[in-house]
Amino acid sequence: MTDRYAVIGNPIAHSKSPRIHALFAELTAQDMRYEAILAPADGFAAAARAFLDAGGRGMNVTVPFKLAAHALADTRSSRAEAAGAVNTLIFSPAGIHGDNTDGAGLVADLTRNLATPLAGRRILLLGAGGAARGALLPLLAQQPAHLHLANRTADKARALRTAFAARAGVCRLQAGGFDALAGQQFDLVINATAASLADEAPPLPDGLYAPDSLAYDMMYGRETPFLIAARAQGAARLADGLGMLVEQAAESFFLWRGVRPPTAPVLARLREK
Ligand code: ATR
């Protein structure tokens, strides 16, 4: 019988996940089907359980249900615990297991697709919400020399720093508001804020981008105000989050199927449009 998977969210109509996983399944000859499920805002758990009862093997979880998925899971991976959110559910007779592949997807996109090693580098992570939190542990695991958390509400960045201080290892982990960034330089600046949704860019001082630096926006689909500003401020390279989307999907696919799908051809196909 064909194994069933799904992505669940609200809204869900524009999700690229069904297309990505269909391509993965084709490229790896896996007998599976992957659909999109729209759940009502207050109906995540019921919809997820209904899919499980109908024989579903696993789910991807997207906005706004990643915290609800964390709560639904019987067991969770350490990276899901660190992120405080779950984007991948694995259904088995033993119960519902929750994982989070977003941060691993980001790191895979940076290090492999964008050939940007992170060890010893200076990273600026913008934002202190769920997206930033999910990226923190996988970024720290790459052992950057310096990781600076900057957020509009500086106290939220400082709280995140406190929560992860014990896991910083060799990395100098700092936090504050945007105005405290003046005079610093970074090799990589990652936008994990929701500013792009409001067609805004975090207000960053000039002089932030080191030579050869990369500006990375977790958003995709259009050139965001953050990327436009980064180009004007001297970032050497710009990247959107489409590669992260494909890489987090590949990591989920691997958790479910035990097979690593090739991501480069899938990313190329998505970029064709
Ligand atoms: P997500 O799960 O996408 O991270 P979130 O948890 O709601 O969403 O967090 C949104 C993040 O984007 C926060 O860091 C928020 O800053 P505040 O903590 O100060 O609210 C940031 N953000 C949202 N709109 C922004 C804007 N216009 N400029 C700068 N930062 C913004």
Image: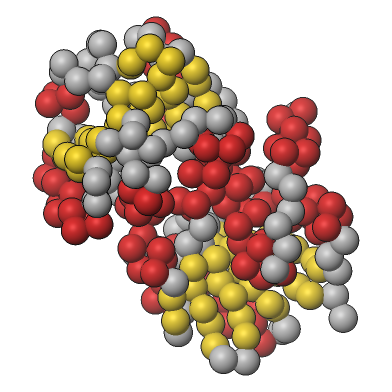
Residue drawn at x 56%, y 25% is: 222
Note whether 109 is above or below 68 in the view shown.
above
* Residue 256 at least partly seen: yes
Task: State which quarter of the image contains the C terminus.
Answer: top right
User: Which sits in the foreground, 47 or 204?
Assistant: 204
The quadrant holding residue 231 is: top left
Q: x and y percent of residue 54 in the render? A: 72, 84
* Residue 125 at least partly seen: no
Q: x and y percent of residue 159 in the render? A: 15, 52
Note whether 90 is above or below 122 in the view shown.
below
Residue drawn at x 33%, y 34% is: 120
Asked if residue 259 lies left or right of residue 78, the reply is: right
Asked if residue 42 lies left or right of residue 187, the reply is: right
User: Which sits in the foreground, 45 or 105?
Assistant: 105
Asked if residue 22 lies left or right of residue 107, the reply is: right
Task: State which quarter of the image contains the N terminus.
Answer: bottom right
Q: Which residue lies furthest to the bottom in this view?
A: 93
Note whether 155 is above or below 225 in the view shown.
below
Residue drawn at x 60%, y 47% is: 247
Numbered label tally = 0
Asked if residue 205 lies left or right of residue 258, the reply is: left
Scheme by which the image is coloured: secondary structure
Q: x and y percent of residue 213 in the render? A: 41, 19
The quadrant holding residue 33 is: bottom right
Residue drawn at x 41%, y 66% is: 80
Q: x and y percent of residue 48 in the render? A: 57, 76
User: Which sits in the foreground, 260 or 55?
Assistant: 260
